[in-house]
């Protein structure tokens, strides 16, 4: 009997474990990677973070300009 590897990603905001690989169902979230360039306060650094769907929703509710949303007709 083989065991399927379960992989989780931790939300950087709330610390929740979000299942991102292995057997379904999967959680959803936002993964961001930013390489900072010259003349920034983070010159030469690469930052990466993950937000679960709930923390993403909380974050974007505070935006002065709303997130642009488009409907997708084909889901992967």
Image (spheres, grey):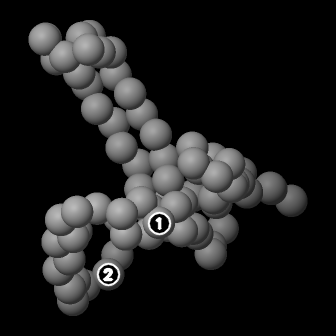
Q: Mark 1 points at which residue?
A: 58
Dividing the picture into quadrants, the one containing residue 68 is bottom left
Specify the farthest residue to the left.
39
Q: Quadrant of residue 24?
A: bottom right
- First-in-chain label (2 vs 1): 1
Task: Residue at 42% x, 60% y: name it.
Answer: 59
Q: Distance between the residues labelled 2 and 1?
A: 24 Å
Q: In this view, does 16 lie above or below 28?
A: above
Pinpoint residue 21: horizontal percent, then vertical percent: 59, 57
Q: In this view, does 44 lie above or below 9?
A: above
In the picture provided, is 36 more to the left or to the right than 13?
A: left
The residue positioned 54% from the left and 68% from the top of the image is 54
The image shows residue 45 at horizontal and vertical percentages of 33, 15
Mark 1 element type: helix
Q: Can residue 67 be seen in this view?
A: yes
Residue closer to the observer: 75 or 60? 60
Q: How crowded is mark 2: few (under 14 residues within 10 Å), some or many (20 or more)?
A: few
* The N terminus lies in quadrant: bottom right
Please rate how many residues cluster around mark 1, counting C-alpha atoms within 10 Å: few if below 14, some from 14 to 19, many from 20.
Answer: few
The spot of residue 6 in percent (x, y) is: 71, 54
Residue 75, labelled with which disc?
2
| Pair 2/1: label in front | 1
Q: Could you tell me residue 17's position as x and y percent?
A: 69, 54
Q: In which quadrant of the rendered image does the C terminus lie? A: bottom left
Give left or right: position of 45 versus 20. left
Task: Give the image quarter of residue 32.
Answer: top left
Q: Check the image and report above or below for 13 versus 23.
A: above
């Amino acid at each position: 009997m083989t065991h399927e590897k379960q992989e989780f990603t931790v939300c950087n905001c709330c610390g929740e474990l979000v299942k991102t690989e292995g057997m379904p169902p999967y959680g959803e979230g936002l993964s961001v990677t930013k390489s900072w360039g010259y003349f920034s306060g983070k010159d030469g650094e690469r930052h990466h973070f993950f937000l679960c769907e709930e923390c993403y929703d909380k974050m974007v509710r505070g935006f002065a300009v709303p997130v642009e949303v488009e409907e997708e007709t084909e889901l992967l």
